[in-house]
Amino acid sequence: MKIKQISTALYCAVILMGTTIGCTSVKNEITNKFNEIQPEMGNHEVPLCVNYLKEICSGFPMRNMSFRNNWVDARLLAKNEDELDLKKVRGKNLIVKPEVSKRKNPDGSTIVCIHLKYVPPVITDAGNTEYAKMFWIPKRDGELPLKAQEMIENAAEKAGITLRETSETKSFRVSEYLSSNDISVKAKAPEEKIIDFINKIHELNPRFYWGNLKLSPDNLEQPKDYILSGTLRFVSIEGEKAADEMLK
């Protein structure tokens, strides 16, 4: 019994967002809490979902797309329904429970509505996972909130867009060692620049999640720009003890 207790205290296996990690008791508490709140955090893989929709309906204008938690809802305009490759919806093991419905327009075009869920891949090799980068650790990443806002604005600048609105960071303490932080953003730019901005956010370390995201064209008939509005969310580590444990 003593050996079992000692080994449990020294090492525990936690499966979190598809990642198996070894952890101390502090890490265990952090990861268990994060696992609990993760369904409300949003998703880190929005680029995968957007690119997947474009793959299904290559060249078809997107009427709108909304993303909340891990669910994606999109409406696309198809001039020729036969060109839709809906089989690809069922062909990706990271996309589950797709629901597709279609509605004919008077002009002969078709509105395609897609409702699907993204499931993160399972990563079993913890040695190749930079786990601590999932969290904002002030002693490594800089003090909040200015640094986080600066990172988002730099991502926008690299994508060639100007953010129309960036809110102040709203922080919510969720445990002794964790806080959830929200920053709302709005932008208007050509579709390719908006998508590039989403990709740039995806590349940031520490990790940012989209708590919610909505994309829509500025004009349904002849869209010139796309309007993005959403909430970026990240989790910060609180306290020196937790920070030191996560940086080991």
Image (tube, rainbow, N blue to C red):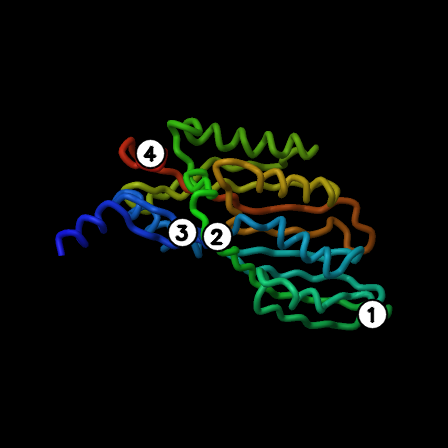
- Can the viewer see residue 91 in this picture? yes
Instruction: Identify residue for label 3.
Output: 20
Q: Are marks 3 and 2 in contact (CB under 8 Å)?
A: yes
Disc 3 to disc 4, how far (Cα)? Answer: 20 Å
> Which numbered disc covers residue 82?
1
- Point out the tag, 4 or 2, that comes first from the N-terminus: 2
Q: Residue at x 38, y 27 (%)?
A: 139
Q: Amino acid at mark 1?
A: Asp
For the N terminus, the image quarter is bottom left
Q: Position of residue 189 (x, y in %)?
A: 72, 40
Q: Which numbered disc, 4 or 2, marks the residue closer to the eye?
A: 2
Q: Cα distance, mark 3 to mark 2?
A: 7 Å
Circle 1 residues within 10 Å: few <14, some 14–19, many ≥20: few
Tell me the CA gap for discs 4 and 2: 24 Å
* Quadrant assignment, res 169: top left
First in sequence: mark 1 vs mark 3: 3
Q: Position of residue 217 (x, y in %)?
A: 73, 51
Element class at badge 1: helix
Observer-nearest of 190 and 203: 203
Report which residue position mark 4 lands on: 243
Q: Is residue 14 left or right of residue 199?
A: left
Name the residue rendered at 19%, 54% in the picture. 4
Mark 2 lies on a secondary structure that is: loop
Q: CA distance from mark 2 to mark 1?
A: 37 Å
Circle 2 residue = 123
The amino acid marked with disc number 4 is Ala
